[in-house]
Image (cartoon, coloured by chain):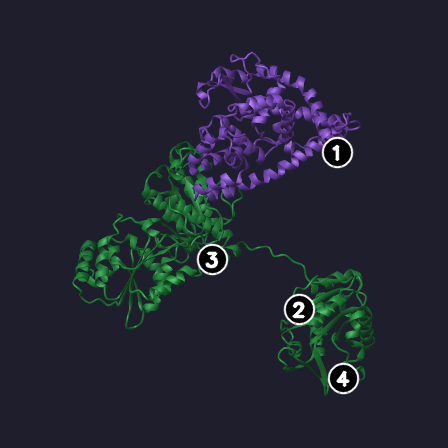
């Protein structure tokens, strides 16, 4: 997509309509599904090489043998879940509904605690990368009361929405409309321009409930970009929907490339939920099953592994990371 | 290993002997239960027994071996000796010598246990109940023991290492002494144990938590006590405090301290209902409770209109004519006209003059010029009337900074949605009846406070409460139904506000009334509204002070710290589940 830096309304609305179109989604999915096995194999191989035996074999240029795919993946996924639980505890503590209500008496203290205790915010604020300076400055200029309100609204939405998402209901969702997540993208009371967008929201939500709320970080979108064969699927902008290219601010004659900040969360949920089902199917074929309580931990972990297969591409893509939005 | 009850003891209160015995008895066989520090009271049903064993006592160890019986062991450590048949013990710390009767102590415990077990378990009729004494820190001369202490039932230091052998020896002695007595069938053994060490759980009574909170709410806080003492040094002072910070409590305490037959205290307030309540609950021979207009009538007489009496009183005050009071305390001064306070301050310039007020409740304009004449101004900041949840809602309603909370948690205020005022009245009635019937609340602890003037045609006038009257002012045996304004200075355990029209949230006066109404409640608040969610519009933004606020009940409730409820619970004081 070719987008303006921070003005969503300048984006060609046709592209957003197209990416939601069911036939378009079907086309993209065919491409993703076609590539999943090869990335799965690469993932298993890479994970197997991380084992002590694998490292040794790799050192001598030998092949790792005798290791089952699912067993390797299972170990890798287990580590990812452990890591997730460790971080998720921080989010759960901070966004505890009662604790949030206490902050209503002192919204500025909410902002300072948010900056210190919520990993995605604290991590971004503490980085000295130039491309993050703009976001850091916007965050500092934001009002504590607005930040509190936005997060409270997101949590309110989540609590109401999640009540309707029993596992039985959720597994049957396979279209953007069925997920009913559009308000998270469109409701202005749940965003703070240039400070709290879907990336941060999705990270918070994911750490509160990875069963039904995927995180939509830069790497997740890059993962989909590679999985979909980097194709533009004949979009008018002739670019991938998972990326955005800012042609308004060319740097030294080149375009700035980033993940698509505004990629619809509902459409995104369609792809990642399908990827989970695919991964789960692999586990079932081997006589196991993935834990649906943390379904999106597996997906995120896998998408990051997909990105690892494109280290060189990633380097080029991230050279011009300068939009300053975390995640 | 024997079952020890308790399984471990943190403190033997300096008794090394008991500690040693405890560790030793732990090594007894499975199936034996040992109770340490067995305490008992005697109900006094049988005077003879009570006289013999005493009304209360304690056994150091009660040992229950279902195959042999119950053995009570009294332990005596330290310097113990027997002199002419009487046991004596020297206190190691003080050196003092005391007469002791270990055998008698053990025997009394045996009597008490036997009485209780036999009355409850008829099958325990042949169970052996016996006693022994143990000197774990010495070796008595067994040849010289008193006749009431046969050697078999006396344990010493050597028995620490062979407790099983020792208790078998004691049981054997008693079996010989009391033929036909012994153990009990296994099916009754657990019943005996239930008598000795019962297992039960207390079902919390519905009232318990209410009463506990009530007790905490009536304690004078440290801050209040400090101000009471500080005022001893001040003849003129103005004390500001938000609702529930204990202004009236301090005012009453000061009135009590200042009053004497020769120096009566005038305690002025604005509300007739508050005056009546003070008179009823805090009557004092040398404290006169009056409203400002009551004071005018008392001094000037019944003639003329109220305005004329008010004017005459002010002239009386400024002319320094005599009045029968030496000290003046004004409570809820925010309701007084500024000139009244000015004139009163002038008249009591040479005596005690304390003014208690809440600037957040000012209804007579924001004129605080009278304060200039008061040299000492104090602020009460700690809420001590309401639970933290109620204080939070009240303060947020008025947009006030939150004062330090009391640390006393209770149910979160609840919001009920009604479509009509008749439905609001029906909900009010259900809450009141639930409180009176299920929780046994005293009707005078319940108040229905409206934010608007109560019209004659209001369905609230038709409310019926089982076993209680409805009164427009606090009355024993009646639920109060009045406006929040008229209830200023008063409080109730449960307050229902049946006419919350959130569309008026833009009005500072309305928000202040909501603050007054909520802050009257000590334990529970129920708000009832007929506003619809579509009308919330800017309401939530008013409370949230953010453009990002959403016009939903969920958001409003979050901002006010209240719980949106869908039904009237059986217990209106219950803590709603989130």
Using the numbered discs, state the Cα–Cα distance from disc 3 to disc 4 in whole angstroms. Answer: 58 Å
Tag 1 residue: A52
Q: Is residue B463 visible?
A: no
Q: Are marks 4 and 2 on the same chain?
A: yes
Residues marked 2 and 3, same chain: yes
Q: Which x, y percent locates residue A115?
A: 49, 39
SS for tag 2? loop
Q: Residue furthest bottom?
A: B84
Which label number is shown at residue B214?
3
Q: Which residue is mark 4?
A: B146
Q: Which chain is green?
A: B
Does label 2 or label 3 sit earlier along the sequence?
A: 2
Label 2 vs label 3: CA separation?
A: 37 Å
Cα distance between the residues tagged 4 and 1: 80 Å
Answer few, some or many: residues within 10 Å of disc 4's Cα (few below 14, many 20 plus, some between 14 and 19).
some
Q: Which residue is mark 2?
A: B12
């Amino acid at each position: 997509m070719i987008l303006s830096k921070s003005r969503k309304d300048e984006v060609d609305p046709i592209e957003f309509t197209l990416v939601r179109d069911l036939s378009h989604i079907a086309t993209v999915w065919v491409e993703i599904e076609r590539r999943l096995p090869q990335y799965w194999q690469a993932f298993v191989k890479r994970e197997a090489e991380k084992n002590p035996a694998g490292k040794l074999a790799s050192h001598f240029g030998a092949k790792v043998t005798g290791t089952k795919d699912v067993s390797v993946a299972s170990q890798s996924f287990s580590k990812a879940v452990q890591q997730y639980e460790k971080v998720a505890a921080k989010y759960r503590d901070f966004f505890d509904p009662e604790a949030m209500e206490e902050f209503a008496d002192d919204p500025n203290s909410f902002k300072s605690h948010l900056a210190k205790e919520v990993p995605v915010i604290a991590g971004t604020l503490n980085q000295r990368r130039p491309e993050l300076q703009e976001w850091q400055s916007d965050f500092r200029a934001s009002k504590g009361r607005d930040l509190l309100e936005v997060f409270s609204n997101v949590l309110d939405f989540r609590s109401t929405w999640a009540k309707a998402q029993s596992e039985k209901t959720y597994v049957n969702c396979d279209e953007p409309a069925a997920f009913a997540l559009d308000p998270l993208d469109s409701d202005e009371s749940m965003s703070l321009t240039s400070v709290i967008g879907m990336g941060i929201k999705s990270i918070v939500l994911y750490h509160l409930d990875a069963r039904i709320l995927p995180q939509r970080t830069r790497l997740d979108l890059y993962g989909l970009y590679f999985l979909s064969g980097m194709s533009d699927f004949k979009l008018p902008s002739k670019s991938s929907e998972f990326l955005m290219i800012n042609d308004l601010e060319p740097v030294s004659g080149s375009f700035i490339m980033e993940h698509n900040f505004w990629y619809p969360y509902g459409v995104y949920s369609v792809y990642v939920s399908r990827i989970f089902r695919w991964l789960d199917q692999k586990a079932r074929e081997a006589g196991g099953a993935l834990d649906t309580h943390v379904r999106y931990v597996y997906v995120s972990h896998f998408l990051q592994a997909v990105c690892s297969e494109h280290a060189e591409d990633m380097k080029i893509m991230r050279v011009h990371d300068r939009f300053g939005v975390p995640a | 290993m024997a079952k020890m009850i308790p399984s471990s003891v943190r403190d033997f209160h300096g008794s090394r002997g008991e500690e040693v015995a405890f560790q030793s008895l732990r090594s007894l066989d499975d199936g034996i239960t040992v109770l340490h520090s067995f305490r008992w009271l005697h109900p006094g049903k049988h005077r003879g027994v009570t006289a013999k064993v005493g009304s209360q006592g304690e056994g150091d160890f009660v040992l229950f071996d279902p195959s042999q019986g119950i053995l009570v062991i009294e332990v005596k450590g330290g310097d113990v000796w027997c002199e002419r048949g009487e046991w004596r013990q020297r206190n190691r710390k003080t050196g003092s010598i005391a007469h002791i009767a270990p055998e008698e102590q053990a025997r009394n415990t045996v009597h008490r246990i036997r009485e209780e077990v036999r009355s409850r378990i008829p099958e325990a009729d042949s169970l052996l109940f016996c006693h022994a004494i143990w000197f774990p820190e010495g070796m008595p001369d067994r040849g010289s023991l008193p006749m009431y202490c046969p050697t078999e039932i006396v344990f010493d230091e050597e028995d620490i290492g062979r407790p099983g052998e020792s208790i078998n020896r004691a049981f054997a002695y008693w079996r010989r002494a009391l033929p036909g007595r012994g153990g009990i069938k296994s099916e009754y053994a657990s019943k005996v144990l239930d008598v000795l060490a019962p297992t039960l759980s207390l079902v919390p009574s519905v009232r318990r938590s209410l009463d506990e909170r009530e007790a905490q709410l009536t304690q004078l806080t440290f801050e209040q006590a400090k101000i009471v003492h500080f005022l001893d040094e001040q003849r003129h002072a103005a004390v500001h405090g938000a609702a529930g910070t204990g202004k009236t409590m301090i005012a009453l305490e000061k009135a009590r301290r200042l009053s004497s037959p020769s120096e009566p205290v005038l305690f002025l307030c604005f509300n007739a209902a508050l005056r009546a309540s003070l008179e009823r609950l805090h009557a004092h021979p040398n404290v006169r409770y009056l409203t400002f207009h009551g004071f005018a009538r008392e001094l000037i007489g019944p003639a003329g209109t109220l305005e004329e009496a008010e004017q005459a009183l002010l002239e009386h005050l400024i002319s320094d004519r005599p009045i029968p009071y030496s000290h003046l305390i004004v409570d809820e001064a925010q309701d007084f006209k500024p000139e009244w306070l000015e004139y009163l301050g002038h008249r009591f310039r040479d005596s005690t003059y304390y003014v208690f007020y809440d600037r957040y409740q000012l209804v007579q304009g924001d004129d605080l010029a009278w304060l200039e004449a008061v040299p000492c101004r104090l602020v009460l900041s700690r809420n001590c009337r309401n639970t933290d949840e109620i204080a939070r809602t009240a303060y947020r309603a008025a947009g006030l900074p939150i004062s330090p909370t009391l640390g006393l948690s209770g149910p979160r205020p609840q919001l009920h949605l009604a479509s009509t005022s008749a439905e609001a009245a029906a909900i009010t009635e259900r809450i009141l009846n639930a409180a009176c019937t299920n929780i046994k609340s005293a009707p005078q602890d319940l108040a229905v406070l409206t934010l608007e003037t109560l019209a004659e045609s209001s369905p609230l006038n038709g409310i019926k409460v089982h076993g209680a009257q409805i009164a427009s002012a606090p009355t024993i045996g009646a639920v109060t139904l009045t406006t929040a304004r008229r209830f200023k200075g008063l409080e109730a355990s449960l307050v229902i506000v049946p006419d919350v029209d959130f569309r008026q949230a833009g009005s500072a006066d309305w928000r202040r009334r909501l603050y007054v109404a909520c802050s009257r409640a000590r334990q529970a608040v129920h708000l009832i509204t007929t506003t619809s969610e579509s009308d919330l519009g800017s309401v939530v933004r008013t409370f949230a002070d953010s453009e990002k606020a959403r016009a939903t009940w969920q958001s409003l409730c979050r901002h006010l710290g209240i719980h949106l409820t869908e039904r009237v619970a059986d217990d209106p004081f219950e803590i709603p589940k989130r």
